[in-house]
Amino acid sequence: ASAYTSGVRGLAVSLRGDEPRHWDTAVAIVARVIPYFINIAEPCVLNLNVPDVEESEVLGLRPARLAAFGTVQTTVVETGLGYVKIGLGETGHEPEPDSDVALLHAGYATLTSVVPMCERPLAALPALDEVMQAAG
């Protein structure tokens, strides 16, 4: 996000697995993506996801959009005096076939161009004075 808002490129890399072990696979895919990445002239942020498998098992690199819903979501497991315990729970949603989640599960590394959350001018919103007057 900082790269994009500063007008430069950024590359985020994730090795996707329950307990990632194949770091060498991620390194090999990153080595292939870097020359492509440095030739992009405009500011951008790319998200590279690599499946946690042997390099020879990666079926290729595919452009992907972000899944509308992930396969897991954060849930509150337990609360107590002064603490909240967080866990991950299955969403039950099937990822769209062209999404990063579906392609990763199929054995592809994925590359997604993302736009970070940025400030949007308030010009498109109604005058805030009117909102406050209506409430009071």
Image (tube, rainbow, N blue to C red):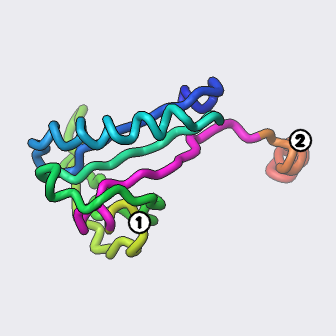
Mark 1 packing: few (<14 Cα in 10 Å), some, or many (20+)? many
Residue 41 visible to an observer of this rendering: yes
What is the x, y in percent for residue 60?
30, 59
Mark 2 packing: few (<14 Cα in 10 Å), some, or many (20+)? few
User: Residue 47 lies in magenta, yes or no?
Assistant: no
Task: Say whether disc 1 or disc 2 marks the residue closer to the N-terminus.
Answer: 1
Q: CA distance from mark 1 to mark 2?
A: 42 Å
Indicate the amino acid at tag 2. Answer: Asp
Kindly report which numbered mark, 1 or 2, lies closer to the viewer in this rendering. 1
Q: Which residues are magenta?
A: 103-120
Q: Secondary structure at mark 2?
A: helix
What is the x, y in percent for residue 25?
18, 43
The reply, left or right, for residue 100 in relation to residue 16 is right
Indicate the amino acid at tag 1. Answer: Ser
Q: Secondary structure at mark 1?
A: loop
The residue identified by callout 2 is 129
The extreme top residue here reads 6
User: Residue 104 lies in magenta, yes or no?
Assistant: yes
The residue identified by callout 1 is 99
In the rendered image, which quarter is residue 33 located in? top left
Q: Residue at x 85, y 50 (%)?
A: 124
Which numbered circle lies on residue 110? none
The reply, left or right, for residue 66 in relation to residue 59 is right
